[in-house]
Amino acid sequence: MTVLSLRELNRATLERQLLLRRSERSAVEVIDHLVGMQAQAPFPPYFGLWTRLAEFRPDDLAQRLLDRSVVRIVLMRGTVHLVSAADCLLLRPLVQPIMDRALRTNNQHRAEIAGLDHAKLAAVARELLDEQPRTAAQLGPLLAEKWPDRKPASLAFAIRVLLPLVQIPPRAVWGRSGQPTYATAETWLGQPLATEPALEDVLRRYLAAFGPATVADMQAWCGLTGLKAIASRLDLRSFRDENGRELLDLPDAPRPDPDVPSPPRFLPPFDNLLLSHKDRSRVMREEDRKRLFSVKNAVLPGTILVDGFLHGTWRLDRQKNSATLLVEPYRKLSEKDADAIAEEGHRLLRFAEPDAAAHDVQITGAVE
Protein backbone atom coordinates (compact mmCIF):
# COMPACT_ATOMS: atom_id res chain seq x y z
CA MET A 1 0.00 0.00 0.00
CA THR A 2 1.00 3.60 -0.57
CA VAL A 3 2.38 5.25 2.58
CA LEU A 4 1.02 8.71 3.39
CA SER A 5 3.47 10.95 5.19
CA LEU A 6 2.36 12.96 8.20
CA ARG A 7 2.23 16.15 6.13
CA GLU A 8 0.23 14.43 3.38
CA LEU A 9 -2.25 13.25 6.01
CA ASN A 10 -2.36 16.72 7.54
CA ARG A 11 -3.02 18.49 4.25
CA ALA A 12 -5.67 15.98 3.18
CA THR A 13 -7.55 16.48 6.44
CA LEU A 14 -7.28 20.28 6.31
CA GLU A 15 -8.53 20.32 2.72
CA ARG A 16 -11.63 18.37 3.69
CA GLN A 17 -12.13 20.49 6.80
CA LEU A 18 -12.18 23.62 4.57
CA LEU A 19 -9.16 25.02 6.40
CA LEU A 20 -6.69 25.38 3.53
CA ARG A 21 -8.94 27.91 1.82
CA ARG A 22 -12.24 29.42 2.80
CA SER A 23 -15.32 27.99 1.13
CA GLU A 24 -18.10 29.76 -0.77
CA ARG A 25 -20.71 27.31 0.54
CA SER A 26 -23.62 28.24 2.79
CA ALA A 27 -23.53 27.65 6.53
CA VAL A 28 -25.96 24.72 6.30
CA GLU A 29 -23.97 23.15 3.46
CA VAL A 30 -20.80 23.29 5.56
CA ILE A 31 -22.54 21.88 8.64
CA ASP A 32 -23.77 19.02 6.45
CA HIS A 33 -20.34 18.45 4.91
CA LEU A 34 -18.73 18.28 8.37
CA VAL A 35 -21.45 15.85 9.55
CA GLY A 36 -22.24 18.36 12.29
CA MET A 37 -20.18 20.60 14.54
CA GLN A 38 -19.51 19.97 18.20
CA ALA A 39 -21.64 22.46 20.12
CA GLN A 40 -21.73 21.72 23.83
CA ALA A 41 -21.13 25.44 24.31
CA PRO A 42 -23.61 27.66 22.44
CA PHE A 43 -21.37 29.86 20.30
CA PRO A 44 -18.22 27.97 19.15
CA PRO A 45 -19.93 26.86 15.89
CA TYR A 46 -20.19 30.50 14.82
CA PHE A 47 -16.41 30.79 15.01
CA GLY A 48 -15.97 27.40 13.36
CA LEU A 49 -18.03 28.57 10.40
CA TRP A 50 -16.30 31.95 10.29
CA THR A 51 -12.88 30.32 9.97
CA ARG A 52 -14.10 28.05 7.14
CA LEU A 53 -16.32 30.37 5.08
CA ALA A 54 -15.35 33.24 2.80
CA GLU A 55 -18.38 35.27 3.82
CA PHE A 56 -20.08 34.48 7.11
CA ARG A 57 -22.16 36.63 9.42
CA PRO A 58 -23.60 35.46 12.76
CA ASP A 59 -27.10 35.89 11.38
CA ASP A 60 -26.35 33.26 8.73
CA LEU A 61 -26.45 30.65 11.49
CA ALA A 62 -28.81 32.34 13.94
CA GLN A 63 -31.60 32.44 11.37
CA ARG A 64 -31.10 28.78 10.51
CA LEU A 65 -31.62 27.90 14.18
CA LEU A 66 -34.76 30.00 14.29
CA ASP A 67 -36.23 28.53 11.09
CA ARG A 68 -35.31 25.00 12.26
CA SER A 69 -32.96 24.25 9.37
CA VAL A 70 -30.37 23.24 11.99
CA VAL A 71 -30.68 22.00 15.56
CA ARG A 72 -28.53 21.22 18.59
CA ILE A 73 -28.84 17.66 19.90
CA VAL A 74 -26.72 15.04 21.66
CA LEU A 75 -25.16 12.78 19.02
CA MET A 76 -21.59 11.61 18.38
CA ARG A 77 -19.59 10.67 21.48
CA GLY A 78 -22.64 11.55 23.59
CA THR A 79 -21.97 15.27 23.16
CA VAL A 80 -24.12 18.11 21.84
CA HIS A 81 -23.68 18.73 18.11
CA LEU A 82 -25.09 21.29 15.73
CA VAL A 83 -26.52 19.44 12.71
CA SER A 84 -28.92 19.98 9.87
CA ALA A 85 -32.51 18.95 10.42
CA ALA A 86 -32.03 16.02 8.05
CA ASP A 87 -28.93 14.81 9.89
CA CYS A 88 -30.71 15.09 13.23
CA LEU A 89 -33.35 12.64 12.03
CA LEU A 90 -30.73 10.38 10.44
CA LEU A 91 -28.02 10.32 13.10
CA ARG A 92 -29.98 10.23 16.33
CA PRO A 93 -31.19 6.60 15.89
CA LEU A 94 -27.67 5.50 14.95
CA VAL A 95 -26.14 6.75 18.20
CA GLN A 96 -28.77 5.24 20.51
CA PRO A 97 -26.25 2.58 21.67
CA ILE A 98 -24.16 5.43 23.11
CA MET A 99 -27.21 6.69 24.98
CA ASP A 100 -28.04 3.22 26.28
CA ARG A 101 -24.49 2.88 27.55
CA ALA A 102 -24.84 6.17 29.43
CA LEU A 103 -27.84 4.78 31.30
CA ARG A 104 -25.70 1.89 32.53
CA THR A 105 -22.50 3.75 33.31
CA ASN A 106 -23.37 7.24 34.59
CA ASN A 107 -22.14 7.23 38.18
CA GLN A 108 -24.24 10.19 39.25
CA HIS A 109 -27.62 8.87 38.15
CA ARG A 110 -27.24 5.10 37.62
CA ALA A 111 -28.63 4.01 40.99
CA GLU A 112 -31.55 6.44 40.84
CA ILE A 113 -32.78 5.22 37.47
CA ALA A 114 -32.14 1.51 38.01
CA GLY A 115 -35.24 -0.63 37.59
CA LEU A 116 -37.33 2.04 35.89
CA ASP A 117 -39.70 1.10 33.09
CA HIS A 118 -37.92 3.05 30.37
CA ALA A 119 -40.75 2.82 27.86
CA LYS A 120 -43.30 4.18 30.35
CA LEU A 121 -40.96 6.93 31.51
CA ALA A 122 -40.26 8.01 27.94
CA ALA A 123 -43.96 7.99 27.06
CA VAL A 124 -44.86 10.22 30.01
CA ALA A 125 -42.01 12.60 29.23
CA ARG A 126 -42.92 12.78 25.55
CA GLU A 127 -46.46 13.77 26.47
CA LEU A 128 -45.18 16.52 28.78
CA LEU A 129 -42.77 17.83 26.14
CA ASP A 130 -45.43 17.77 23.44
CA GLU A 131 -47.51 20.04 25.63
CA GLN A 132 -44.68 22.59 25.58
CA PRO A 133 -40.87 22.67 25.53
CA ARG A 134 -39.37 22.44 29.02
CA THR A 135 -36.04 22.78 30.77
CA ALA A 136 -34.62 19.86 32.73
CA ALA A 137 -35.46 21.75 35.94
CA GLN A 138 -39.09 21.93 34.83
CA LEU A 139 -39.34 18.40 33.47
CA GLY A 140 -37.75 16.56 36.41
CA PRO A 141 -40.30 17.59 39.10
CA LEU A 142 -43.21 16.78 36.77
CA LEU A 143 -41.84 13.28 36.25
CA ALA A 144 -41.21 12.94 39.99
CA GLU A 145 -44.95 13.35 40.56
CA LYS A 146 -45.33 9.87 39.02
CA TRP A 147 -42.06 8.49 40.40
CA PRO A 148 -41.82 10.21 43.79
CA ASP A 149 -39.10 7.86 45.05
CA ARG A 150 -36.69 9.03 42.34
CA LYS A 151 -34.69 12.24 42.18
CA PRO A 152 -36.05 14.74 39.63
CA ALA A 153 -32.58 15.44 38.22
CA SER A 154 -32.00 11.75 37.56
CA LEU A 155 -35.36 11.38 35.84
CA ALA A 156 -34.54 14.35 33.61
CA PHE A 157 -31.16 12.81 32.79
CA ALA A 158 -32.82 9.56 31.77
CA ILE A 159 -35.12 11.41 29.39
CA ARG A 160 -32.23 13.22 27.71
CA VAL A 161 -30.86 9.74 27.01
CA LEU A 162 -34.08 7.95 26.09
CA LEU A 163 -35.64 10.60 23.85
CA PRO A 164 -34.19 12.58 20.92
CA LEU A 165 -34.24 16.02 22.55
CA VAL A 166 -33.19 19.16 20.73
CA GLN A 167 -32.20 22.37 22.51
CA ILE A 168 -34.42 25.07 21.08
CA PRO A 169 -33.86 28.82 20.60
CA PRO A 170 -33.10 31.31 21.97
CA ARG A 171 -30.32 29.00 23.20
CA ALA A 172 -27.30 29.44 20.87
CA VAL A 173 -28.80 32.36 18.92
CA TRP A 174 -26.06 34.99 18.52
CA GLY A 175 -26.59 37.96 20.80
CA ARG A 176 -29.22 36.19 22.88
CA SER A 177 -29.15 33.85 25.85
CA GLY A 178 -31.33 31.13 27.28
CA GLN A 179 -31.30 28.01 29.41
CA PRO A 180 -31.25 24.65 27.60
CA THR A 181 -34.92 24.07 26.81
CA TYR A 182 -35.96 20.81 25.23
CA ALA A 183 -38.43 19.57 22.65
CA THR A 184 -38.49 16.22 20.93
CA ALA A 185 -36.88 16.21 17.52
CA GLU A 186 -40.01 14.77 15.93
CA THR A 187 -42.25 17.54 17.29
CA TRP A 188 -39.77 20.38 16.68
CA LEU A 189 -39.03 19.29 13.11
CA GLY A 190 -42.44 17.86 12.26
CA GLN A 191 -40.93 14.63 10.91
CA PRO A 192 -40.15 11.16 12.30
CA LEU A 193 -36.68 9.82 12.93
CA ALA A 194 -35.17 7.69 10.18
CA THR A 195 -36.35 4.10 10.48
CA GLU A 196 -33.49 2.45 8.57
CA PRO A 197 -30.49 4.81 8.76
CA ALA A 198 -27.45 3.54 6.85
CA LEU A 199 -24.26 3.74 8.89
CA GLU A 200 -22.29 2.91 5.75
CA ASP A 201 -23.31 6.25 4.21
CA VAL A 202 -22.36 8.11 7.39
CA LEU A 203 -18.88 6.54 7.41
CA ARG A 204 -18.37 7.64 3.81
CA ARG A 205 -19.32 11.17 4.83
CA TYR A 206 -16.92 10.98 7.77
CA LEU A 207 -14.08 10.12 5.39
CA ALA A 208 -15.10 12.98 3.08
CA ALA A 209 -14.72 15.39 6.00
CA PHE A 210 -12.00 13.79 8.17
CA GLY A 211 -10.20 11.18 6.08
CA PRO A 212 -8.05 9.35 5.36
CA ALA A 213 -8.68 7.52 8.62
CA THR A 214 -8.34 4.24 10.46
CA VAL A 215 -11.31 2.29 11.77
CA ALA A 216 -10.18 3.35 15.25
CA ASP A 217 -10.45 6.98 14.10
CA MET A 218 -14.01 6.39 12.89
CA GLN A 219 -14.93 4.89 16.25
CA ALA A 220 -13.30 7.74 18.16
CA TRP A 221 -15.33 10.24 16.12
CA CYS A 222 -18.76 8.73 16.63
CA GLY A 223 -18.39 6.76 19.86
CA LEU A 224 -19.72 3.56 18.30
CA THR A 225 -17.83 0.27 18.18
CA GLY A 226 -17.71 -2.68 15.83
CA LEU A 227 -17.18 -0.56 12.71
CA LYS A 228 -14.48 -2.73 11.13
CA ALA A 229 -16.99 -5.11 9.55
CA ILE A 230 -19.06 -2.23 8.20
CA ALA A 231 -16.02 -0.44 6.77
CA SER A 232 -14.90 -3.66 5.06
CA ARG A 233 -18.07 -3.62 2.96
CA LEU A 234 -17.37 -0.18 1.55
CA ASP A 235 -15.59 0.53 -1.73
CA LEU A 236 -12.56 2.27 -0.25
CA ARG A 237 -8.91 2.77 -1.04
CA SER A 238 -6.29 1.65 1.47
CA PHE A 239 -3.10 3.44 2.52
CA ARG A 240 -0.61 3.15 5.37
CA ASP A 241 0.54 5.87 7.70
CA GLU A 242 4.16 6.23 8.75
CA ASN A 243 3.55 3.86 11.67
CA GLY A 244 2.14 1.12 9.46
CA ARG A 245 -1.52 1.59 10.37
CA GLU A 246 -4.09 1.03 7.63
CA LEU A 247 -5.86 4.19 6.50
CA LEU A 248 -9.13 3.98 4.58
CA ASP A 249 -10.32 6.63 2.18
CA LEU A 250 -12.78 7.41 -0.57
CA PRO A 251 -11.16 6.57 -3.91
CA ASP A 252 -11.50 10.06 -5.40
CA ALA A 253 -11.15 12.18 -2.25
CA PRO A 254 -8.68 15.09 -2.44
CA ARG A 255 -5.15 14.48 -1.17
CA PRO A 256 -3.21 17.69 -1.80
CA ASP A 257 0.51 18.09 -2.21
CA PRO A 258 2.12 18.09 1.26
CA ASP A 259 3.83 21.40 0.48
CA VAL A 260 0.62 23.31 -0.25
CA PRO A 261 0.55 26.36 2.05
CA SER A 262 -1.68 26.23 5.13
CA PRO A 263 -2.53 29.72 6.42
CA PRO A 264 -3.00 30.42 10.13
CA ARG A 265 -6.45 29.49 11.38
CA PHE A 266 -8.31 30.26 14.59
CA LEU A 267 -10.37 27.23 15.65
CA PRO A 268 -13.19 27.53 18.16
CA PRO A 269 -13.29 25.66 21.47
CA PHE A 270 -14.08 21.96 20.97
CA ASP A 271 -13.57 22.02 17.20
CA ASN A 272 -14.08 18.52 15.81
CA LEU A 273 -10.79 18.70 13.90
CA LEU A 274 -9.08 18.12 17.25
CA LEU A 275 -11.49 15.48 18.58
CA SER A 276 -12.39 13.16 15.73
CA HIS A 277 -9.40 10.83 15.40
CA LYS A 278 -7.95 8.22 17.72
CA ASP A 279 -4.48 9.26 16.57
CA ARG A 280 -4.39 13.06 16.59
CA SER A 281 -0.79 13.40 15.41
CA ARG A 282 -2.03 14.54 12.01
CA VAL A 283 -2.80 17.95 13.56
CA MET A 284 -0.82 18.12 16.81
CA ARG A 285 2.39 17.03 18.48
CA GLU A 286 2.05 14.64 21.38
CA GLU A 287 3.33 17.21 23.88
CA ASP A 288 0.81 19.73 22.55
CA ARG A 289 -2.00 17.18 22.82
CA LYS A 290 -1.16 16.58 26.46
CA ARG A 291 -0.98 20.30 27.15
CA LEU A 292 -4.29 21.07 25.46
CA PHE A 293 -6.25 18.22 27.03
CA SER A 294 -4.93 18.80 30.53
CA VAL A 295 -6.98 21.99 30.83
CA LYS A 296 -9.11 22.39 33.94
CA ASN A 297 -12.56 20.76 33.83
CA ALA A 298 -11.88 19.56 30.26
CA VAL A 299 -13.10 22.92 28.92
CA LEU A 300 -11.06 23.30 25.76
CA PRO A 301 -10.05 26.83 24.71
CA GLY A 302 -9.95 28.23 21.22
CA THR A 303 -6.82 27.08 19.38
CA ILE A 304 -4.58 28.29 16.57
CA LEU A 305 -3.12 26.35 13.67
CA VAL A 306 0.26 27.35 12.23
CA ASP A 307 1.36 25.51 9.09
CA GLY A 308 -1.58 23.20 9.64
CA PHE A 309 -0.70 22.05 13.17
CA LEU A 310 -1.84 23.04 16.64
CA HIS A 311 0.40 25.81 17.88
CA GLY A 312 -1.37 27.52 20.79
CA THR A 313 -4.58 28.92 22.20
CA TRP A 314 -6.60 32.12 22.02
CA ARG A 315 -9.34 33.93 23.91
CA LEU A 316 -11.27 37.17 23.65
CA ASP A 317 -11.24 39.81 26.36
CA ARG A 318 -13.88 42.55 26.17
CA GLN A 319 -13.45 45.60 28.41
CA LYS A 320 -16.06 48.33 27.93
CA ASN A 321 -15.34 49.76 24.46
CA SER A 322 -12.21 47.77 23.67
CA ALA A 323 -11.75 44.14 22.58
CA THR A 324 -8.46 42.26 22.84
CA LEU A 325 -7.55 38.95 21.28
CA LEU A 326 -5.03 37.18 23.52
CA VAL A 327 -2.95 34.58 21.68
CA GLU A 328 -0.64 32.21 23.57
CA PRO A 329 1.61 30.21 21.23
CA TYR A 330 3.04 26.95 22.50
CA ARG A 331 6.38 27.89 20.93
CA LYS A 332 7.90 31.08 19.60
CA LEU A 333 6.70 32.12 16.17
CA SER A 334 8.63 33.31 13.17
CA GLU A 335 8.12 36.97 12.37
CA LYS A 336 6.18 35.96 9.25
CA ASP A 337 3.83 33.67 11.19
CA ALA A 338 3.34 36.25 13.95
CA ASP A 339 2.36 38.88 11.37
CA ALA A 340 -0.04 36.47 9.68
CA ILE A 341 -1.65 35.53 12.99
CA ALA A 342 -2.02 39.20 13.94
CA GLU A 343 -3.69 39.93 10.60
CA GLU A 344 -6.08 37.00 10.95
CA GLY A 345 -6.68 37.97 14.58
CA HIS A 346 -7.84 41.45 13.60
CA ARG A 347 -10.22 39.85 11.13
CA LEU A 348 -11.57 37.68 13.96
CA LEU A 349 -12.07 40.75 16.17
CA ARG A 350 -14.01 42.54 13.44
CA PHE A 351 -16.28 39.51 13.24
CA ALA A 352 -16.74 38.84 16.96
CA GLU A 353 -16.68 42.38 18.38
CA PRO A 354 -17.76 44.74 15.58
CA ASP A 355 -19.06 47.38 17.99
CA ALA A 356 -15.82 47.72 19.97
CA ALA A 357 -14.14 51.09 19.44
CA ALA A 358 -10.66 49.59 19.72
CA HIS A 359 -9.27 46.22 18.66
CA ASP A 360 -5.94 44.80 19.79
CA VAL A 361 -4.16 41.49 19.14
CA GLN A 362 -1.62 40.49 21.79
CA ILE A 363 0.67 37.53 21.11
CA THR A 364 2.72 36.40 24.09
CA GLY A 365 6.40 35.62 23.44
CA ALA A 366 5.75 36.16 19.79
CA VAL A 367 8.92 36.10 17.72
CA GLU A 368 11.89 33.70 17.65
Image (cartoon, helix red, strand yellow):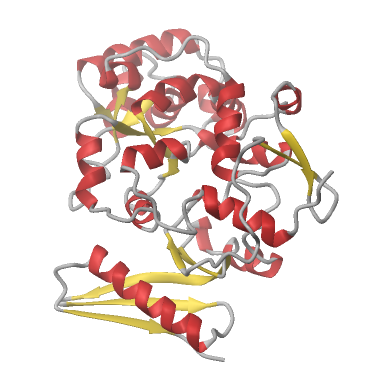
Q: Residue at x 61, y 54 (%)?
A: 256
Q: Residue at x 76, y 25 (%)?
A: 232
Judge by depth and name the residue closer to the eye, 125 or 11.
11
Instruction: Examine the rendered structure and indicate whether residue 95 appears above or below residue 348.
Output: above
Q: Is residue 107 visible?
A: no
Q: Is residue 143 found left or right of 275 in the rendered image?
A: left
Instruction: Examine the rendered structure and indicate whether residue 201 appears above or below residue 117.
Output: below
Question: Residue 260's quadrant in the figure?
Answer: bottom right
Instruction: Examine the rendered structure and indicate whether residue 46 appears above or below residue 106.
Output: below
Question: Residue 309's quadrant in the figure?
Answer: bottom right
Q: Residue at x 51, y 23 (%)?
A: 113
Percent from the top left, x then y, of residue 214? 73, 41
- Most extreme residue toward the bottom is 368
Percent from the top left, x then y, of residue 353? 22, 67
Question: Residue 122's quadrant in the figure?
Answer: top left
Percent from the top left, x then y, of residue 330? 57, 77
Percent from the top left, x then y, of residue 327? 43, 77
Judge by depth and name the residue closer to the eye, 257 or 61.
257
